[in-house]
Image (cartoon, rainbow, N blue to C red):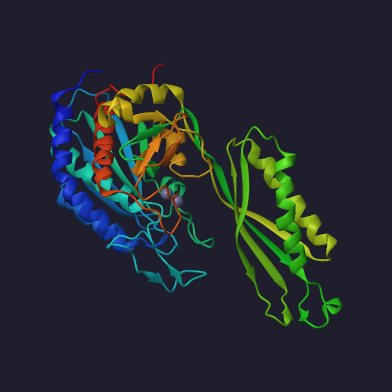
Amino acid sequence: MTDSPVHAELDRLADLAAGRVVAWRRHLHRHPELSNREEGTARLIAGHLRSLGLDEVRTGIAGHGVVGVLRGTAGGGGGRVVALRADTDALPVRDLCGEEFASRVVDADYPGGPFPVSHACGHDCHTAMLMGAATVLSEVRDRLPGTVLFVFQPAEEGPPVAESGGARAMVEAGAFAGPVPTMAFGMHVTPYPKGYVGYRAGVQYGASVLVRITLTGKQVHGSTPWQGVDPMPAAGAVLTGIGQLYRQVSAFDPVTVTIGHVEDVGRFNVIGETVTLWGTVRCAAESGMAEVQDRLRRLAEHSAAAYGATAEVSYLQPVPPVRNTTPWVEAALPTLRRVAGPERVAETGTTLGYDDVSELVSRFGGLYVMLGVQDAVLDADGRPVPEEGGRGLVINHNPRFYADDDTLVTGVRLHAHVAYDHLTGALLPAG
Ligand SMILES: [Zn+2]
Ligand SMILES: [Zn+2]
């Protein structure tokens, strides 16, 4: 693939848009919204897309999803359709990123709240970068032989359990019924050297499911536990037993089971009726998911029975793994190398994070990559380590997670180049 004058034009336009992209990112960072509550974010996005004169700006998809449709006028293409996707929601995490645009937002009404809210996963960057890419690509519409869908997806982090939302909900709402994408593309900002692009053929992110375990006993005064059934020791037994699950499944396919939240209804002198454990199961191999779920259910039910309590185990919000196929990776590598520079494109390992962009990549084909945004260097084994004098490596979802503004233009260019290359037929899997 040779570089065309259009590629240079995309870069020039991305540089021109960079200032606005940083401003959007900072605005979004100051005004984060939790999953399925992305109202202001969606309004900002839709307003911008309309200002670009796109062919269509669809709003209110599966909650606050927005899809902009840009039909290229170059003609002569293969009728291809590229879906560029950004997620838009924030997390119930305090913002300790240390920037002057740090969030002080608290969502008082969210189920289970009140929660502090912040973009601790960097979706502010994703949204701003895709708004920038829409700016760039709309300027070269007459050079595009196909259609671009700008997909702004809510609730990637998972909606409240009583609600639906996210990528699958957008699919079910018909967001991709027409035109149907011939490629989906997404990226995630990550603790990796600034401006580096990480890719992986095979599983990039694992399969995920939310687990809720409700242990039920019989409420009683704290001074007479024998007159009731205390679900608390059963909860303790489940938590301890989870450590043994790892030894019951193959050590060669990584699995994690994490209980991140315990909900108890007792008080210091009341043994409550229930204890609810909320957690997440992650598997590098999707095939391992059913087995881990069965074993966890068995552990919970039998541990509870040992204490005279009962356990009800529910698995919610399943997300398939993000799997990049080798043909798509090979097709995209020239594009990635052109955008980031060949020395800044590196193969990464599998992680047990998840991203429901997998709903799109698995349906339509395409690719998902990581974009480095932190003060890091790669060690001899290709693993990111902190850069001397930098702010260190801070994983997503940590209150101190940070992303460097200077890296955003690389994300804008990635979206633009991937879209252009796919529509022109340069980025297509062999076979
Ligand atoms: Zn996240
Ligand atoms: Zn994320």
Q: Can residue 61 be seen from the camera position used here? A: yes
Residue occupying the far front of the picture: 389
Is 55 left or right of 178, judged from the image as shown? left
Q: In which quarter of the image is the C terminus?
A: top left
Which residue is nearer to you in this view: 293 or 59? 293
Residue sitting at x 43%, y 40%: 385
Q: In this view, does 383 lie above or below 279?
A: above
Residue occupying the far right of the picture: 226
Residue sitting at x 42%, y 45%: 171
Residue sitting at x 67%, y 35%: 251
Give residue 341's quadrant in the image: top left
Q: Can residue 369 be seen from the camera position used here? A: no
Is 219 left or right of 153, judged from the image as shown? right
Residue 363: x and y, percent?
Answer: 45, 35
Q: In which quarter of the image is the N terminus?
A: top left
Residue 48: x and y, percent?
Answer: 20, 53
Residue 193: x and y, percent?
Answer: 36, 39
Q: How many marks?
A: 0
Is 58 left or right of 249, judged from the image as shown? left
Residue 66: x and y, percent?
Answer: 31, 51
Residue sitting at x 73%, y 41%: 247
Is 294 left or right of 179, judged from the image as shown? right
Give residue 346's quadrant in the image: top left
